[in-house]
Image (cartoon, helix red, strand yellow):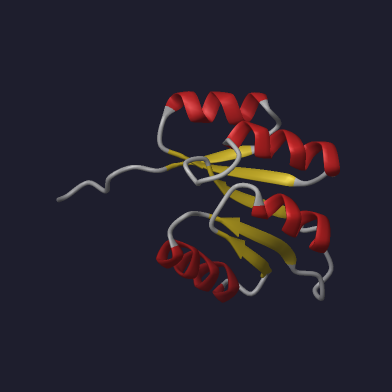
Amino acid sequence: MNSEHKIQVVISSRYGLFRAGLRALLEHALIFRVLGEANTLSRPVRLAKRFRPDVVLIDAGARGLSGPETSRLLKEMDPGIKIVILAATEQQIEDCMGAGANAYVRKGRSRRV
């Protein structure tokens, strides 16, 4: 990756505050450029067709298509696209990874100290 290229990302989550926080975190890192946000799982597919991002972050619990279906559609459209799943359950992780997702982040409650 040259110094001018930023990793282009689409974020999909049903929670607007989460999307905004993730966008701020990614853009603060200076190597990412967020191309768009989606609150359903059908919208990131449309955004990916339009913008051709490097990475799509998918909340497996979002409304619309299922996480695995979204992963499959994205990989059919662009086999090189990287898909990171935000998942709450092992089943979501297994289903999405089996459908072409490249990585996952486990959602869950934070531990109190």
Q: Residue at x 58, y 47 (%)?
A: 58
Q: Residue at x 80, y 73 (%)?
A: 3
Viewer-nearest residue: 7 or 15: 15
**Can residue 54 be seen at all in this image of the molecule?**
no
Is residue 95 visible in the rendered image? The answer is yes
User: Which part of the image, by quadrant, shows the N terminus?
Assistant: bottom right
Residue at 66% across, 67% down: 36
Could you say which is closer to the camera, residue 30 or residue 107?
107
Closer to us: 102 or 113: 102
Measuring 67% from the left and 39% from the top, which residue is drawn there?
A: 70
> Is residue 32 shown above or below 110?
below
Is 113 above or below relative to 68?
below
Numbered circles on residues, count: 0
x and y percent of residue 102 in the render?
A: 67, 37
Relative side of 15 to 1, left or right: left
Task: Provide residue 7's location: percent of width, then percent of height.
Answer: 73, 63
Residue that protrudes farthest toward the front in the picture: 64
Q: Is residue 60 left or right of residue 32?
A: left
Q: Where residue 105 appears, x then y in whole percent?
A: 49, 43
x then y, percent, for residue 38: 59, 59
